[in-house]
Amino acid sequence: MDTQAAQAMIRFGLGRRGDETPPADPLAWLSGQLAGPDPGRFDGLPDGADALDLLLRSRRAEDLAPVKALYRQEAAAQLGFAVITPAPFRERLVWFWTNHFTVSLRMFAVTALAGAFVREAIRPHVTGRFADLLLAVMRHPAMLAYLDNRGSVGPDSPAGQRLQRGLNENLARECLELYTVTPAARYTQTDVTEFARVLTGWSEDPTRKPSGFIFHPNAHEPGSKTVLGRRFPEGEQGGIEALAFLADHPSTHRFLATKLVRHFVADDPPPAAVTRIAAVLAESGGDLAAASRALLTLPEAWQPLTKLRSPQDFVIAAMRATAPPAGAVPTGPGPAGTVPGGMVPAG
């Protein structure tokens, strides 16, 4: 296997499958994985609304075993697909953005919702616009539960006045600090509070298909709000506009570019490479496929490998080396706790 093919399969992929022929044109092979919808099939797993319903029923019955079993099934299906995916670069991007928008199992509700979160909020958007990815993530019950936005109520809203409840700033703060502009944008505590007011009323409902997201007007803080000098209207639309503004902010472009270059190129990101990817994001309106293709054109991306695989990457690479024949795809979750799950030959 020549050097460029090896770079493509290791630096940008998940390692060579045992029966896989190295790509004759590594750049075309990688770029081609960014076209079309996500190839993963996860039949038989619940959407976010159904997972939320399972969580609520399990809590009422004081039996959390079904939730834990669902998580094992989700993990088996996701890892199983990583082992056999024909688009490992795209799968790496799924993992990258899932890590960027981290949710934690320390919040038990996330145990039920984590799989749906990846399938519904992350996978469909890794080659789309960052603004769409951000909106899908911020509206998903997994994120709303993890950062307590379900209980964030506008103090002057009808619900706030009746219940004497107020803001929870967790989601607003994390979005500004870790998901978008970062402290480089010089936001203030006032910006955090105003953004938290923007996001009041964003909550969950197991009857709202498919993800379980709902906007509660009675819990939303009335009036316009100002974040980073930009004024946004009241209501759900204000939140949508605020997220679009943050997604397209120059500080966000720089932050995302730095993370992408660090992940795929070097732990100490070359400044020129970061500048190039940030420029692509700015010029394309946050097109993540364009940014991912731009990574492939960086001279630094084809220098000798110096980064070490994470433990998860190492295990997946080892499993891919002994994977089923090419064309096998997961069709369901498989038995709880198994890896890979539900794989059959395609066609």
Image (cartoon, rainbow, N blue to C red):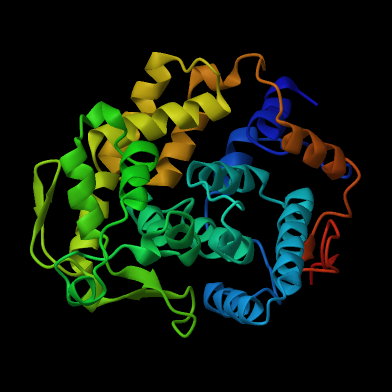
Judged left or right of residue 138, residue 235 is: left
User: Which residue is at 70% across, 30% downward?
Assistant: 310
User: Please, is residue 27 above or below residue 211 in the view?
Assistant: above
Q: In this view of the protein, which residue sits in the foreground, 335 or 158?
A: 158
Residue extending farthest front: 164
Who's the residue at 31% across and 36% down the image?
252
Horizontal and vertical percent position of residue 103 = 53, 50
Q: Nearer the viewer, residue 338 or 42?
A: 338
**Quarter placement of the N terminus:** top right
Residue 284 visible in the current orientation: yes
The C terminus, quarter of image: bottom right
From the viewer's side, name the closer residue of 197 and 232.
Answer: 197
Residue at horizontal 28%, vertical 76%?
A: 216
Q: Quadrant of residue 336?
A: bottom right
Residue drawn at point x = 71 percent, y = 51 percent? 86
Quadrant in the rendering for residue 88: top right
